[in-house]
Amino acid sequence: MPELVQTDENGVMSIDYIGFIPLIVESLKEMQNTIAEQDEQIKYLSDKLGVETKGLRSSVTSNEEINIDGSGKLFNADGASVKYSLPADCTQAGLHIFDITGKIVKEIKLDTAADVANIHNSETGFGTFIYTLIVDGRKADTLKKYVTR
């Protein structure tokens, strides 16, 4: 932008910084448009993922009794454990384990109201997994864990 550069009688050059304000404002508008487009893409892709992999600790049920508790035995060479509790009126429950790509790795039927589900690494392998508690056909809670050697 040569029109923003001025030269005085001694040959000293200076910049008209006020002239840059419209450029800066226009750049900010372009950045806001880009951010809005990216937000739309993120929402679209999140909607396509499916309910099992959406939130890492989100709950889609109002039943506060249902939960997965990550305070049990964490990750070691023997796999992972997930502590859980179910409501008294639960008729059917299961723990679904997904890899980071969203592929289901293992399903465990839960028969007791509160217990610890032990998963050996020979059943899942190593890496990042998403554990989803399903109660009476609905997602109750989700937990992300990382299993290492």
Image: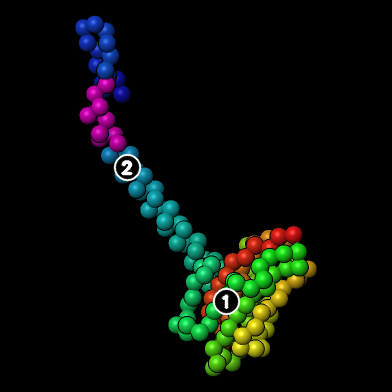
Which corner quadrant of the image does residue 105 belong to?
Answer: bottom right
Spatial separation of the CA atoms under disc 1 and disc 2: 44 Å
Above or below, 79 relative to 22: below
Magenta segment range?
15-24
Residue at horizontal 54 percent and vertical 88 percent from the top: 87
Looking at the image, which residue is at 35% across and 48% down? 33
Magenta stretch encompasses residue 95: no
Answer with left or right where residue 88 lies relative to residue 107: left
Q: Residues within 10 Å of mark 1 (few under 14, many from 20)?
A: many
Q: Is residue 120 visible?
A: yes
Tell me the amino acid under the disc marked 2.
Leu
Name the quadrant of the N terminus: top left
Which structural element holds mark 1? strand
Q: Nearer the viewer, residue 90 or 37?
A: 90
Q: Is residue 1 above or below residue 8?
A: below
- Left or right of 38: which side holds 3? left
- 15 and 89: which one is in front? 89
Q: Nearer the viewer, mark 1 or mark 2?
A: 1
Mark 1 — residue? Answer: 68
Q: Main secondary structure of the magenta part?
A: helix
Report the disc number at residue 135: none
Q: From the top left corner, tell me how far across and down residue 2 is, in percent.
A: 29, 20
Instruction: Classify the position of the C terminus by image quarter.
Output: bottom right
Q: Residue 28: which numbered mark, if any?
A: 2
Image position of 35 with respect to 54: above or below: above
Identified by mark 1, the residue type is Ile
